[in-house]
Image (cartoon, rainbow, N blue to C red):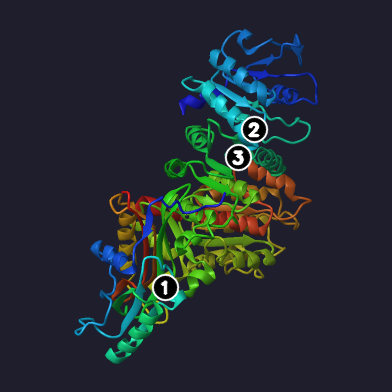
Amino acid sequence: MALEPVFGPQAVNLTEFEAKALLMKNGIQAPRGIIVTAIPDKIELRFPLALKVSDASILHKSDVGGVRAGIVGIYDLLEEFSIMQKRFPGSQFLLEEMAPKGVEFIVGATRDQVFGPVLMLGSGGIYTELYHDVAFRKLPIEKADAVDMIREIKSGIFCRGFRSQTIDCGSVVDLLMKASAMVLSEKLGIESMDLNPVIVSSNGAVVADAKISVNRRK
Amino acid sequence: MKQFNKLLSPNAVAVIGASPDRSKIGNAVLENLVSQGFEGKIYPVNPSYEEILGLKCYAEIESVPGKVDLAVIALPAKLAPTVLEQCVRKEVAFVIIVAGGFSELGDEGRKLELSLKEKIRGSRTRLIGPNTVGVLFPHSKVNTALTPGDRIWFPHEGQIGFISQSGALGLLVMDSITENGTGISGFVNIGNRADIDEEDLMEMFLGHAETRSIVAYLESISDGGRFFSTVKRVNMEKPIVVLKTGRTSEASAAASFHTGALASNDRVLEGILRQVGVVRAYNEVELLDFGKALAYARPLEGKRIAVLTTAGGLGVLTTDLLTTEDARPALSMAKFNDTELAELKKHALPIASLNNPIDLTADGSTQSYASILDLLSNSDNVDGIIAYALPQTPKIDSSVIEPIMSASGKKTTIVGVIGNRLTKDLMLQLEKAGIPAYPTVQRTVAAMKALYLRSTYIRRLLYGS
């Protein structure tokens, strides 16, 4: 019996901007950003910046050349913006600060046919796809479950310190608990969620990219 | 579970479709019940006979005098609903429907199975099956297996409650474990689980005094929420081991979300079993091996293991397997302090290697083995002991079982008995003494790791991470 995420008939994808706004409203950190259709005269964001096409119908933005990261100054930005505008005419764009460097994780949620809503933590970046190094739990989870999930995956080693790199794993536990509450909230009606990557440094966890589908009926 | 008493130890059992024809299932079921020595009343039911196997035969279940606690319907699927209805009228407590040809066979069968559910709705009759090979409860001598008793061995009374979704796998595994004398406290093949399911049976075994561990072979889980909450609760009191097949089935390839694409049956189940603290088996041998360790051995409080052997090779191989992370985490080798080392030295030959693994060599004696085992079982630096009982050298004989028994009263002890010619009898004795013993190094080590996992899970569930 194959498992498929059970999407409600009305499930719609939020744009990255909407998804991140929702996360921030629920106490999860994401980079500051604005939605633009043109480059504003005054930019209150701190370089380096990332520029991303903002269209709910484009789920895998980088696959279609819809992401430019590491934009260091205004001239760079103007140039990248004009390229992007030609590629996606009439689209909106998300301009946001870059997440600080750190260890990449993936945090996700889906609805399992047998067990209902489940939460996933995995080693992020290419390791997600290469090693499938992930841990699932049925929701709701307790703090001890979140700690176990971190222990279960290979990247959890950074929480114990590895090659003098130590990251704030309390922030991962915190993020998992908040994600758990969000997915269980009927009001939010979240069907599926990919926070990938979540960048964790000694200063906490920041969601660098987010896909969320919600059931609008609820 | 008081409600399951009539299944666990019925006073009267009826076999509907009983037959003197040895090729019929109704014959095997009746024969097994009789030859197992069931002491309650046995009622063969079949309108064509006056008597079967010397027992008075009844035309139908409703003409049986007195109460019937358990009825086995060994008739074709089509007849099952009508006969089940009669059983409900007779207020039979538990009914087993052997025949296949229900929901496993498409729409027609599904309808037929629904009609079974209809028949018992609102009644006190509970149904096992359909499509089941039956049940075995050695303590009350109930055996309704459909396999003729001259084809397999059935386990004797033991401490492991065995739930199997597959009938054949269940019967074959039971036949296998008799080789080393392992017993069971009960076996139920849930079949299509139209009524009684694995969760009901976990509750049953939880309340069954003879059962000390529960092992379940499952091919699917019908209600995830019910599974989760039942297993979590039962497992806190009696250890559960789960073997779940269908591991390689893929998650939805079409899922546009990473998480959805990664959420395969197996990954989700893996997480959930950890969450409820259940030790997972990856094959049928592990299933019963772990069930045995969890039923017999003391809980393992830490990961420091002492290894005692008279064969050096076994010691180093054990060390390798024990301290390597595989499907289960690595454990560590216990380190002895100077006082302990001095004590160990007193009891061993000069050629013995006393750093863990302790190798008494082929010249080691039962006496030396006993003294050292006693020392290990009293050491604060040791959480668990793996002791190899190897009667193949002249100075070791089957009397090693006594120090092993006394050690296992004090410390978690798992025994490896490697070989064939002289080991069979020793294995049977250890089994009788309720000491988990295994015939390979790998199985010995895996059993110890299973105990460790169980302890860490329970500690986490009780006290948090």
Residue type highlighted by circle 1: Lys
Judging by the rendered image, the residue that carries numbered circle 2 is B131
Quadrant position of residue A168: bottom left
Disc 3 is placed on an element classified as loop
Mark number for residue A61?
A: 1
Judging by the rendered image, the residue that carries numbered circle 3 is B165
Q: Gap between marks 2 and 1, in whole Å? A: 51 Å
State left or right for residue B458 relative to residue B350. left
Given this view, does label 2 or label 3 mark the residue nearer the observer? Answer: 2
Residues A129 and B340: in front is: A129
Of the 4 image quadrants, the one containing the C terminus of chain B is: bottom left
Residue type highlighted by circle 2: Asn
* Category of crowding for the residue at label 2, using alpha-carbon neighbours closer than 10 angstroms: few (below 14), some (14–19), many (at least 20): many
Disc 2 is placed on an element classified as loop
Chain of the residue on which disc 3 is drawn: B
Residue sitting at x 65%, y 51% = B438
Chain of the residue on which disc 2 is drawn: B
Q: Gap between marks 1 and 3, in whole Å? A: 46 Å
Quadrant position of residue B137: top right
* Residue A132 position within the rendered picture, expressed as x and y whole percent measured from the top left: 51, 66
Disc 1 is placed on an element classified as helix
Chain of the residue on which disc 1 is drawn: A
Q: Gap between marks 2 and 3, in whole Å? A: 10 Å
Given this view, does label 1 or label 3 mark the residue nearer the observer? Answer: 1
Residue sitting at x 76%, y 11% = B49
| Residue A209 visible from this viewpoint | yes
